[in-house]
Image (cartoon, helix red, strand yellow):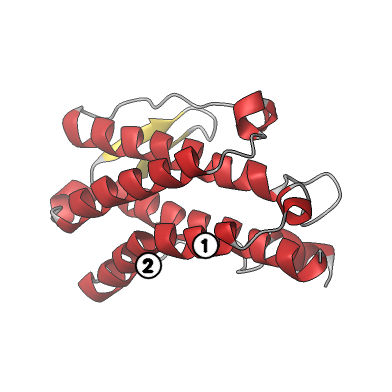
Amino acid sequence: MDIEARKYPIGKAKFPTEYPDGLIRVMINDFASLPADLRVVAQSLTKKQKHSSYRDGGWTALQIIHHIADSHCNAYTRLKLTLTEDHPTIKPYDENLWAALEDGNSELIEPSLKMIEGVHERMTHTFNNMVAEDFERRFFHPQQGESRDLYWLLSLYHWHGRHHLGQIRVIQSLVS
């Protein structure tokens, strides 16, 4: 398996130009099922796999699990800010520094799995109760220097969790 396939096991993120209701439903349903899928894979990891990466210099399976919790909590905050404020500027963070912290390397994955379950349940409920005008609300991302709408946020996090789940599966296939 080449390095690009290891880095992007489901491909790079793609953002549709249109969001028909059927596509939104598929993305929300996939997003809602991620916690259960992640739990199954995470609980099957060996100790060696937990401390292994999908590539040289990449995050370990533990760091990926904790990163998903961190990232999706930030996504939920961004979603709520965008729904309640007029074009908010979101707070970026350095995900590599977060992953390097002790809690980002902890073998205690249950708290992160629970966080992911709770955040996904709340976000799924919110997404399911949004209308087109809600999805069109925008926030400013200072790291990217661009304004984004909530269709983009749904697309990104629909992909993001599956992307990292794929990386963990790569680790399982490479490390026995």
- Splitting the image into 4 quarters, where does residue 28 fall? bottom left
In x, y percent, where is residue 148? 38, 42
Instruction: Tell me which numbered mark, 1 or 2, is placed earlier along the sequence.
Output: 2
Q: Quadrant of the C terminus?
A: bottom right
Residue 148 to residue 135: above or below: above
Q: Residue at x 72, y 46 (%)?
A: 60
Which of 105 and 9 lies nearest the eye of the viewer?
105
User: In the drawing, does residue 141 fall left or right of residue 13?
Assistant: left
In x, y percent, where is residue 147? 39, 37
Q: Quadrant of the N terminus?
A: bottom right
Residue 173 to residue 56: above or below: below
Residue 12 to residue 133: above or below: below
Residue 114 has which mark? none
- Res 35 visible: yes
Which of 95 and 171 lies nearest the eye of the viewer?
171
User: In the drawing, does residue 104 fall left or right of residue 160?
Assistant: right
Which of 98 and 5 lies nearest the eye of the viewer?
98
Q: Residue at x 32, y 72 (%)?
A: 26
Q: Secondary structure at mark 2?
A: helix
Q: Which residue is mark 2?
A: 30
Label 1 Cα neighbours within 10 Å, binned few <14 / some 14-19 / many ≥20: some
In x, y percent, where is residue 101? 66, 25
Label 2 Cα neighbours within 10 Å, binned few <14 / some 14-19 / many ≥20: some
In x, y percent, where is residue 66? 56, 40
Q: Residue at x 41, y 62 (%)?
A: 36
- Res 147 visible: no
User: Looking at numbered disc 1 in the image, what kind of residue is underneath it?
Assistant: Arg
Q: Which residue is mark 1?
A: 162
Q: CA distance from mark 1 to mark 2?
A: 9 Å
Marks 1 & 2, CB-CB < 8 Å contact: yes
User: Looking at numbered disc 2 in the image, what kind of residue is underneath it?
Assistant: Asp
Q: Residue at x 60, y 28 (%)?
A: 103
